[in-house]
Image: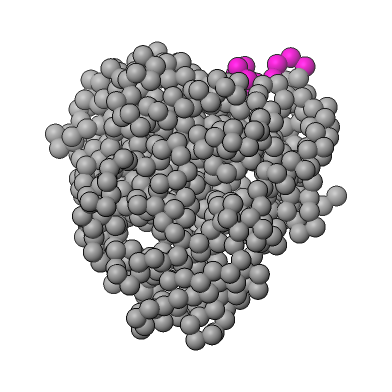
């Protein structure tokens, strides 16, 4: 039999039927649902008189619109001030009730960002196909799953048929070879990858991340890397199963137990690319050369090492690209040649489906410990990815470290990653953010976003500007 | 879904690469639980001077006069011309609903982000891929004319310019069939319900943990 990539194996295991032109019906094992991209899908089912194909494949949670301040939480949807947002969360609650779908309500300690709670509950398992009406569904690929975002029409399609109409993507391998330096995290690795291949580099591909630096990452780190596959243009990113994967899943509420667990673990051993599998494209990065990264522009590919200076559009020969740099500099209020570590920030956001897990919170807390937020920082906030992450962090005393340093310690949700709730930037404000997109207006109209790792964000809060955390480590 | 056969319309040139879905429809409008009404807030941050909110009267907002959608000659436009990697970012189908609600039936660009590309076909919005050279050529033809319309023939897979020049484009056969006939995907898939059930039975034997909850 021909050698297969991990993606080939996942694809083959889920094909229900294939047409002559290669279009296939692909079976979906897990469907995650949130309040923003599902109401029109439930409405579509109602209008057509259709029911859910398999209700127990769905897990729902409100996350995008929920407030993150304590006084707005604990009383159901009553704390949502915005009437339009409130209707949306209430619509999710009603839809889940009507269609008998399992939902973690706003007050449930298991509530959180959909891409944090899926894995946390063991609802994401190796070998699964996982979809959600959210582009960062690629996160779940960290478990050797085939996971990608879908639009609302496809949400409705999966609800009604448990399948998606798909054409197979191409295979890309990104290997990060060797070990990273101290202070370089999963976020820096994935930003460096996007800097290398560009935001459309992965379009049409499923990316498998591999190499020693990827294998060395915890599951949390692997989720950060797969999360941003979409920022490289790839709907799906994935990492082969190993002992780290299996250790993380064991004992989680939705994970199999007893004999079924043993059988599952045995099956999961095969969720790796065969040694001689062929990829359509292979990209290699030297881990040792990756520095802490900071985005300077309005696309995730506009990223540089902390030691660099802001680029000059005059140095770019391609006219479309040169104009793009010029427009980005204007929007970001930066000058060509400015040192990245000289850029002052106004706000700091530590959170999002990219970086709000316990390991992220711990890394940021290490930097914050015993320090104070700089005077020029108007707001530094930490938003845990779920109620359970928040609880764990509080057990470890991390909340106190942040509060003592002058950070706000919030309730879980998507928050200022996309600013659908009250957490947002004002025009012209500059933010060091652990989220995933630095598009114009993403964190609030006119807001300026710089994407960084949790440790780099915490360091920017303490120093008031970007700073190389490797130099901090040396001082300490 | 509305059928798409032949469409002729005014071309609106949006000379930008990497147009993301946050730019197409900003987040504050995603709180709606409907599929309609997104047209007035399409490209909201570029179109209006001050950020808007859902429910306001958008016709009273101050415009960025030089943004293409606000220029007199492009009023009633139904074909959008843009640069590479159009529709990148979030999976929000609201981006497509905003484009169709405004009146767009077709987009022409050298490349698209995958999820946006998929979402377009589900809503009768035809995303056409033409080479960078041809896209460049159309941009300059628009610039050197007072009014510019293109005809899109999906059956023949052709874009026809005012001078009669034609550019062929590729489209997946299944998607073309669905668009030409205005077909509902779900209905088509449910014709294979027996295959789906058979797959589930086989899979439950191999991997029962996938069906537990």
Residue at image position (52%, 53%) is B116
Residue B33, compared with residue A19, is above or below; it is: above
In the displayed structure image, the side of residue B44 where residue A373 appears, left or right: left
**At x 53% / y 74%, what residue is drawn?**
B151
Residue A133 is inside the magenta segment: no
Whether A331 is drawn above or below A457: the answer is below
Asked whether, in this view, residue A464 is left or right of residue A211, the answer is left
Judge whether residue A366 can be spotted in this image. Answer: no
Q: Whole-percent x and y of residue A258?
A: 74, 14
Where does residue B137 sit, x and y in percent of width and height? 45, 80
**In the displayed structure image, the side of residue B77 where residue A232 appears, left or right:** right
- Considering every residue shown, the one lying at the far bottom of the view is B163
What secondary structure is the magenta-colored segment mainly? loop
Q: Quadrant of residue B114?
A: bottom right
**Residue A254: in magenta span:** yes
Q: Residue at x 69, y 28 (%)?
A: A54
Residue drawn at x 44%, y 53% as measured from the top left? B101
**Which contiguous range is marked in magenta?**
A247-259
* Residue B212 x %, y %: 70, 21
């Amino acid at each position: 039999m021909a050698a297969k990539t991990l993606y080939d194996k996942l694809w083959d295991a889920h094909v229900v039927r294939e047409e002559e032109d290669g279009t296939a019906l692909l079976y979906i094992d897990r469907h995650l649902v949130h309040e923003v991209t599902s109401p029109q899908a439930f409405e579509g089912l109602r209008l057509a008189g259709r029911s859910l194909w398999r209700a127990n494949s769905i897990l729902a949670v409100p996350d995008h619109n929920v407030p993150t301040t304590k006084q707005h939480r604990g009383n159901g949807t009553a704390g949502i001030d915005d009437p339009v947002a409130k209707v949306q969360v209430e619509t999710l609650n009603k839809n889940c009730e009507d269609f008998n779908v399992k939902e973690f309500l706003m007050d449930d300690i298991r509530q959180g960002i959909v891409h944090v709670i899926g894995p946390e509950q063991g609802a994401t398992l190796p070998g699964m196909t996982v979809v959600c009406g959210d582009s960062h569904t690629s996160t779940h690929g960290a478990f050797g799953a085939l996971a990608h975002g879908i639009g609302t029409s496809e949400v409705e399609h999966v609800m009604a048929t448990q399948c998606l109409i798909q054409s197979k993507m191409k295979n890309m391998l990104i290997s990060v070879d060797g070990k990273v330096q101290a202070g370089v995290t999963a976020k820096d690795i994935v930003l460096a990858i996007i800097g290398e291949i560009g935001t459309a580099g992965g379009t049409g591909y499923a990316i498998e991340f591999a190499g020693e630096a990827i294998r060395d990452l915890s599951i949390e780190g692997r989720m950060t890397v797969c999360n941003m596959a979409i920022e490289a243009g790839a709907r799906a990113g994935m990492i082969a199963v190993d002992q780290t994967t299996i250790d993380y899943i064991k004992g989680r509420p939705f994970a199999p137990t007893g004999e079924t667990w043993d059988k599952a673990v045995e099956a999961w051993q095969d969720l790796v690319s065969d040694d001689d599998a062929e990829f359509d494209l292979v990209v290699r990065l030297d881990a040792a050369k990756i520095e802490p990264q900071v985005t300077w522009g309005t696309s995730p590919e506009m990223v540089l090492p902390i030691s660099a200076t802001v680029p000059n559009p005059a140095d770019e020969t391609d006219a479309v690209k040169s104009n793009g740099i010029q427009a980005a500099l204007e929007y970001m209020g930066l000058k060509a040649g400015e040192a990245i570590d000289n850029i002052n920030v106004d706000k700091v956001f530590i959170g999002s489906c990219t970086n709000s897990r316990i390991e992220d919170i711990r890394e940021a807390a290490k930097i914050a410990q015993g320090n104070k937020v700089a005077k020029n920082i108007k707001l530094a906030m930490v938003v845990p990815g779920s109620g359970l992450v928040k609880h764990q962090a509080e057990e470890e005393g991390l909340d106190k470290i942040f509060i003592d340093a002058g950070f706000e310690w919030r309730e879980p949700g998507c928050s200022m990653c996309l600013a659908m709730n009250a957490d947002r930037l004002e025009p012209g404000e500059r933010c060091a953010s652990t989220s995933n997109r630095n598009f114009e207006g993403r964190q609030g109209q006119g807001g300026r976003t710089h994407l960084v790792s949790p440790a780099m964000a915490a360091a920017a809060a303490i120093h008031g500007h970007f700073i190389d955390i490797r130099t901090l480590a040396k001082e300490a | 879904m509305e059928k798409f056969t032949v469409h002729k319309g005014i071309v609106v040139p949006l000379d930008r690469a990497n147009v993301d879905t946050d730019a197409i429809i900003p987040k504050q409008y995603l709180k709606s639980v409907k599929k309609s009404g997104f047209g007035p807030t399409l490209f909201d941050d570029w179109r209006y001077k001050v950020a808007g909110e859902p429910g306001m009267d958008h016709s009273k907002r101050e415009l960025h006069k030089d943004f293409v959608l606000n220029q007199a000659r492009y009023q009633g436009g139904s074909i959008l011309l843009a640069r590479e990697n159009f529709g990148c970012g979030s999976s929000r189908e609201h981006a497509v609903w905003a484009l169709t609600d405004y009146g767009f039936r077709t987009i022409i660009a050298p490349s698209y982000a995958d999820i946006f590309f998929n979402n377009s076909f589900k809503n009768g919005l035809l995303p056409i891929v033409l080479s960078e050279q041809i896209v460049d050529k159309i941009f300059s033809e628009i610039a050197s004319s007072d009014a510019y319309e293109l005809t899109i023939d999906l059956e023949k897979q052709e874009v026809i310019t005012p001078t009669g020049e034609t550019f062929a484009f590729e489209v997946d056969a299944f998607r073309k069939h669905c668009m030409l006939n205005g077909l509902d995907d779900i209905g088509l898939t449910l014709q294979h319900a027996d295959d789906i059930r058979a797959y589930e039975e086989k899979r439950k034997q191999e991997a029962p943990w996938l069906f537990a909850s």
